[in-house]
Amino acid sequence: MPAVDDEDRPKKKIVHEIGQDLTLLSAGELTERIGILKDEIARIEADMARKRAMKSAADSFFKK
């Protein structure tokens, strides 16, 4: 079986890159990106809350 190079694999389209030049994007594209970024912020905040809850539970369990 031939080896598969990373170059041969389909590349994931970058939806938004932090610091990217926005001058060529339309207002609609910018609105779409804002929505994507808000969804990502919500996902990160949910994971942060989950991790804080796990840490709090562990701290309570191991508290002397």
Image (tube, helix red, strand yellow):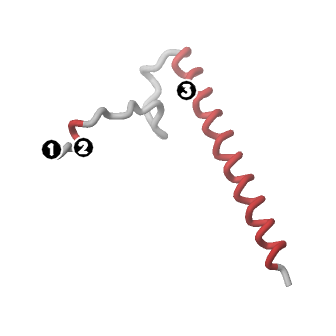
Q: Secondary structure at mark 2?
A: helix
At horizontal 44% and vertical 35% (from top left) the residue drawn is 20
Q: CA distance from mark 3 to mark 2?
A: 27 Å
Percent x, y for residue 55?
74, 66
Q: Secondary structure at mark 3?
A: helix
64 above or below 43? below
Q: Which amino acid, mark 2?
A: Asp
Percent x, y for residue 48?
69, 53
Q: Which amino acid, mark 1?
A: Met
Q: Which mark is residue 6?
A: 2
At horizontal 41% and vertical 33% (from top left) the residue drawn is 14
Q: Residues within 10 Å of mark 1 (few under 14, many from 20)?
A: few
Dot 3 or dot 1, earlier in sequence? 1
For label 3, the residue is: 33
Q: Which amino acid, mark 3?
A: Arg
Q: Which mark is residue 1?
A: 1
Dot 1 or dot 2, earlier in sequence? 1
Percent x, y for residue 64?
86, 85
At horizontal 72% and vertical 53% (from top left) the residue drawn is 50
At horizontal 78% and vertical 59% (from top left) the residue drawn is 53
Q: Which mark is residue 27?
A: none
